[in-house]
Image (spheres, grey):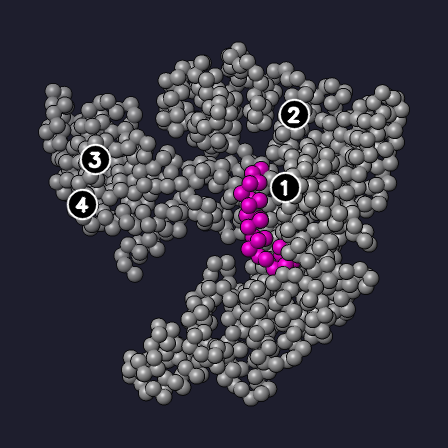
Amino acid sequence: MDSSSTRAAATGTESSPALTGRADDLQSAVAAIHGGTPVAVFLLGDSGIGKSTLMEAIVAELGSEVTPVRIHGSPSLTNVPYGVLGPFIVGLPVQEATSQLAVLRTLWSHLEEQKRATHKPLLLIVDDAHDLDEATAGILAELAAAGWAKLLVGAAARHGLPEPLLQLWFEGLAERHDLRPLTLAQTTEMLELELGPRVLPTVAEILWEASGGNPMLLNGLLDDARNDGTLLQRNGVWLFTRQLKSHGDRLTDVVRRQLLQRSPDERQALNLVALAEPVPRELIEAVVGEELVAALIEHELIRVSAAPIPELRLWHAVYGDTLRNLISPARSLQLRQSLLRLMDHEPVSAEGLLRHVSWSMECGAEVEDRQLLRAAVLASRLYEDELARKAASLVKDPELQMAARSVLARTHYNMSDYAAARDILEADVGRGNTVAGLLAGSLLWAAVLSALGHTPADIMDRTGAILRAGEQLAQDNPEGAEGILAATNERLATIRSMVFSLAGEYGEDDAPAAAAVAVSATASAAGRPAPANYLEGVFRQSLEAERLIVQGKPLSAFMVASEAPETAGSEPDELYCLTDFLVVRAAAAAIHGGDWQAATNLLAGFSAAAGPTLISFGGGVHAAHGIIMLYQGKASQALDTLSAALEALRLKDPQQLFALTAAMAFAAAAEVGAKEKSALFLADYESALGPVSRYLRILAEMAIIYGKARLGNYPGAIAALKRLGRPDPARNTKGLELDALAFCLALGDRDSASRLLELKPDLEGRRAAAICDYAGAISTDQAADHLEAAKSCEAAELWGFAALAYDAASHAYRAAGDTLRERMASGQRKRCLDRADNRAGEDPAGPEGALGILTRRERDIVALAVRGLSDRQIASELQVSVRTVEGHLYRSYAKLNVKGREQLPGLANDGNGTPG
């Protein structure tokens, strides 16, 4: 280990959260200053990017090897020659204060005095160098170029360096480092160093997005979120409990310091943008002038959109809450009036309307009821529940108050408080003097009842109140009776489709669901518009997807579920969680079929587009990843991921996935023998409402039985699993049987193999194919079949089943007395188990992956054979006989289960980390 590495280890600088992503810059700068050719090191980046922190780390790394002298640029002295050098030239006569030679002589005398005291080379540390005057920059450049001192310089990238310092870089005498914002991976690393390893991925994603990767803003948001309870640690897992706010003390202090550097006119412009964003550029320019707006854009304090009508926003969105919090209500009202005088229409964008209404409420201005209701709906869609409740509670119009109460109920639904949502909604069921009032909140009411465990039949019985009220309303309004009855019946049909789809309940003939999909496809092919009641079609498509999963057709199910969002079009205000619901169905299909990449892509795409939904539905995303890991045989990773997801779902569970996640976490804990954890997860499962969907309910029950069997306290597990897989022999549930029999095989039940082979022709997906291949090998019990099944399972990334197949092959070879192949199969089994135990992105343990079962000499010979050398050439290269080469190759072929040289290159590549 070199001296710089030793110092890093001693000081811990490289593992500091503040230096995440800066290790290369740190070591390069230290090497340059310590003895490299450069006479200066420049660190350039935006405000808050970490220049000063990195400079101090570099100085700490150098330790006592240099004599540090600090110089700090100041905007107030930019136009004062040698202004920042004042402390070093206090003894210089006034008449010589502008003489470069006199200043240089006096400065050097001061520096020499410090150098004599330490006997170490000088290092001039210049922060905020963009604020240096040209004269000072010239003297510093001369000192460095002459070799009298080295420079460590930090400057804002936007302003750049003064010309004399920049010249050093042009001449190749300086090393430049442009510090970039942190990536998502670096943000995650920083949070893990700060908080510990168990940070829910959504925390990193949200903080990274909000901060733009700026470490100063990231730290401010992190500290404020911890202090106000937005970021909490629950059972060891860090997660967000609500929407991230950006007006805490730490961030407020950052913004206040930024504002102090701006003129009163600039502060007024920034306040206006913060209060009204997004706001048309021409409005702000009309108030403060075009030049001032252009200057703020140039200084990257505000940004302008490229929309047809240019709009202004703050450069850092997180500054918005803080700025608005610093403005008094009286001043806010004054600014609002100055802007309203210039506006000829209300904001047209949803975001603009929301800010406009929010601003009006903040300063006590009157807002029209319909605008309040629109803002409340928008806020609840964005999971800004506090704002939604505030706007909805201000609605006074009796005709709109029912819709406003449905928004209040929606905010409780967002928080998974279904009982509170039900109590609000049921007070209005079957009431209303208009069709809109009568039907307001009815879809959400039915979804709430479904979440609370009511059956579709029970919910439909309760909708009788809506039907009777609709009939009474039609009777009271004979001129509009036909339209009233049509709207009422259409809503009841939609509710019926929704609750049966949520529950995964379909009829014996399954005709309605299949017909809906067929009609949708036909209409699309013919170019005709979608049916007026598109929601009913979407729910029927979703139900069709679940039916196909249960029947063992996950590829078809995924296709149907993926098409449903396109059919859905624009979601109604009550059901903006519809996309989340459809994502769950599509992900379930992909996971059941073993298409891990499709599931991962689906979830990644949802996370990227989710925005505020990520806090609410993020737990569901991580639960899906955990189930994938469990199916792949990665029980340890699955346990970590599922337990973290469970903590998120305790707070918000809009798709009722808590019980399923607890069941899968229980199975994973039982798999790795974590008895205490498994007991906690079992208690979570037993105390929770079950998943709404029938398929997910049965799957959760299977996982519980499997976990209990793993723990050794369920002697009837196999029979129970088979009953769950085939609850009604008269119905097609081959997909459920696959899940049940896969659990049975994992428990060692070889009798399940014959039924799997019967099911095989009717099953879709590579997961089913691989498991059935394993079942086929069990039925023949031939070593070669076990090896082929193992390869099939590896290709499907089912590492647990692959290990079982290799283990069976090993036993078969042992029974046949073939010890060489027995060792080979055992080695491959270990490789699969290692692969299952590895973290994502890591290569399997062992010398050469798949080649690890070979001896060193065998690996050397195989490597040369892969390069294309003949047996004779290999013998010459290694100075052995040709017969020795042939013998080693023969044994290698047997161990690796290949037929000859032509299969070696692919295996060698597998050994270097290529999947299966």
| Identity, as a three-letter code, of the amino acid under mark 3 | Leu
**Location of residue 5 (image quadrant):** bottom left
Quick check: 706 above or below 132? below
Q: Residue at x 68, y 67 (%)?
A: 760
Q: Position of residue 500 (x, y in %)?
A: 78, 46
Q: Residue at x 34, y 37 (%)?
A: 45
State the residue position of label 1: 566
State the predominant SS element of the stretch in magenta: helix
State the residue position of label 3: 165
Q: Are marks 1 and 4 in contact (CB under 8 Å)?
A: no
User: How many residues crowd around disc 1 within 10 Å: few (fewer than 14), some, or many (20 or more)?
Assistant: few
User: How many residues crowd around disc 3 within 10 Å: few (fewer than 14), some, or many (20 or more)?
Assistant: many
User: How many residues crowd around disc 2 within 10 Å: few (fewer than 14), some, or many (20 or more)?
Assistant: some
State the residue position of label 4: 121
User: Is residue 324 on the magenta stretch?
Assistant: no
Q: CA distance from mark 1 to mark 2?
A: 25 Å
Q: Position of residue 535 (x, y in %)?
A: 72, 38
State the residue position of label 2: 374
User: Is residue 607 on the magenta stretch?
Assistant: yes
- Residue stretch rendered in magenta on the structure: 590-612
Q: CA distance from mark 1 to mark 4?
A: 68 Å
- Relative placement, left or right, of 493 versus 283 is right
